[in-house]
Amino acid sequence: MKVLSLVPFDYESFKKLKEKFPKVDFLERNQLKEDDVIDVMLGWDFNDGLNLIQQHHIKWVQSVSAGVDYFPLEEFEKNNVILTSASGLNSQRVANFVLLQCLSDSYSINEAYINRINRKWKVPENIYDIREKNIIIFGTGSIGKSISEVLSPFVRNIYGVNTSGKKSSNIFDATYKIGDIIEGKITFSNIDIVINCLPETSQTTHIFYNKLLKKFSKPFTYISIGRGETTNTSDLIQFVDKGDIKTAFLDVFEQEPLPKDSKIWENNRIIVTPHISGMLPHFRCDFFELFSKNLYNYCTHKELNGIVDYKKGY
């Protein structure tokens, strides 16, 4: 069996993999020969990925990220290639980031920072007690569940939203179907913080637009850490400008890097972070540990973790 890694090995991870899988040949790109038959590929090459799959008869691709919107999923399905995501790898890290944003908002840290720039000693006006607040999380997968677990000791109620409306975990006080919310079958008058951790699919692109943003209490706080393409930026800015959104914390954007001429930069009530919520200080070590568990499953003919459903897109 041969494994091609487009993610550079670090010495310790490579050593552990070789010890655990002595019969597996682990190759990096510069070691690949034209006639090599590769069983597994780690990572993705935007320019040459499909050629590698077809030329080397690759059966399984392990993504380095939870999101898989950048993969040609139709081609994977057509070529009977299994794709697994790194779902769960950085869920705790993202959840901690969201907690930070929620607590920051409750103390109006952004307003205090603006006052600091203007050398103004003034207690922010919009300080609140997060224990009195209700939160709704769009996306109840690994990241959504981790966010709910981290926030549950701090807030009043946490609601989940997914495509089916089925309760995926008891950590949500209730779970709703996203279509029912958009169509107005379910209404909310008491949502204070909206958290978007949806993946990008054909169904979720620009799902947070005027019609959906109108469904929540005014003003509310908006936190986006899923995929930038799920938010209609123009509509979001309008809601912030009108005061319907009190503060927007954006870690993902429709275009990354965010262009210098974007109107987002001009708005003091939109907090910008450069897609850092899931960053891990020791990413490669953690990633290869996740892959090692999946490779064991593959070698022992057990079900892989994180298999992507090509019809759902995640």
Image (spheres, rainbow, N blue to C red):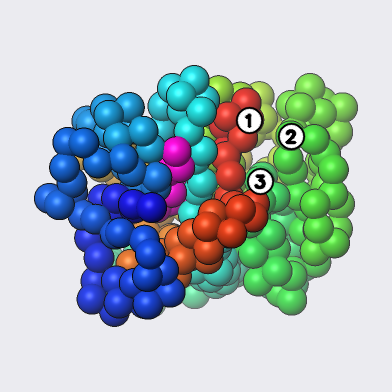
Q: Which mark is residue 139?
A: 3
| Highlighted range, magenta | 59-67
Q: Is residue 6 left or right of residue 173?
A: left
Rendered position, 222 above or below 290: above
Magenta stretch: helix, strand or loop mostly: loop
Look at the numbered disc 2 and give the secondary structure of its residue.
loop
Q: Give the mark nearer the N terminus: 3 vs 2.
A: 3
Q: Is residue 107 left or right of residue 18?
A: right
Q: Give the mark nearer the N terminus: 1 vs 2.
A: 2
Horizontal and vertical percent for residue 42?
A: 35, 50
Instruction: Find residue 44 and report its image quarter.
Output: top left
Q: Is residue 133 visible?
A: yes
Residue at the far left: name it. 30
Residue at position x 66%, y 46% in the image:
139
Residue at position x 64%, y 55% in the image:
302
Amino acid under disc 2: Thr
Q: Is residue 138 left or right of residue 93?
A: right
Rendered position, 11 above or below 85: below
Q: Is residue 178 left or right of residue 60?
A: right
Residue at position x 83%, y 39% in the image:
165
Rendered position, 151 above or below 214: below
Residue that mark 1 sits on = 312
Q: Nearer the viewer, mark 1 or mark 3?
A: 1
- The crowd level at tag 3 (other Cα within 10 Å; few <14, some 14-19, many 20+) is many
Q: Is residue 283 visible?
A: no
Tell me the quadrant of the picture where the C terminus can be found.
top right
**How many numbered tags mark residues here?**
3
Q: Which mark is residue 163?
A: 2
Amino acid under disc 1: Lys
Horizontal and vertical percent for residue 77?
A: 52, 25
Q: Nearer the viewer, residue 27 or 162?
A: 27
